[in-house]
Amino acid sequence: MNLFGRTRRGFIAGAVVLMTCMGAVRILPVYGDHPEQTMQRKEREMSSVTLEDVTTFTNEYILRNSKDGLFTYYDKNAKKDLELILDNIHREKLSKTRKNEYFVCVNFTGRDGRTYDLDFFVQGKSKRYFTIDKKGISIHKVNGKECYVWVYHEKKDVWTKKIIETEEKQSAQPAYPKPDYP
């Protein structure tokens, strides 16, 4: 009986240890097989930024920087200030471009009667720290006609602007002389 009592206590102790371990394993959250998966999950959980937050911030930025309902933007090509009235922010085009940076496309009507599509980049790790990259604001379209297109470079994993040459700009460029060799 003494042997049976020890075996029984050993079995019970082993079962308790096993059940405790299994319970602990089940209590711990399962994130993934690899550390980078755990980090990605933690990063998603910590990110408190939604695309609606980006939209709201952009709208408030434009309104805060408008005077009498007009948002002023300096057009480098025309070398003049444009007075713009906010029409809408394209929620369907909002996107995250990289960590802590978001792309926003905004439509305006100018006092000159033209329509303007401006691209903005909102930066910040949370809505409390959002800023607009003022140098990144650019005119994408005028009256629906693109000034540039976005080109994705897969090897570098970056987007760049490709300027669309207009006929006026192309004809203004001097023709290159033909070489003298046959």
Image (cartoon, grey):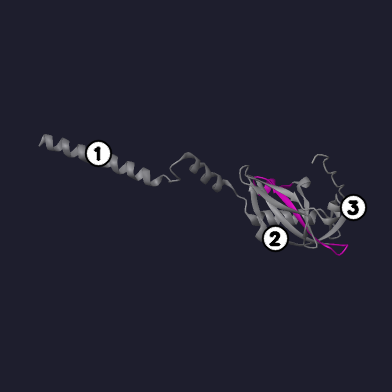
Q: Is residue 19 left or right of residue 3?
A: right
Q: Nearer the viewer, residue 153 or 111?
A: 153
Q: Nearer the viewer, residue 75 or 62?
A: 75
Q: Residue 90: give its label.
A: 2
Residue 123 higher or lower than 114, as above or below: above
- Residue at the spot x=74%, y=52% of the render? 120
- Residue at the spot x=59%, y=47% of the render? 47
Q: Is residue 53 left or right of residue 179?
A: left
Q: Residue 75: give its label.
A: none
Q: Residue 80: give its label.
A: 3
Q: Amino acid at mark 1?
A: Gly
Q: Amino acid at mark 2?
A: His
Residue 131, position as x, y percentages in the image: 73, 47
Residue under pointer 1: 14
Q: CA distance from mark 3 to mark 1?
A: 82 Å
Look at the image and give the residue range highlighted in magenta: 110-132
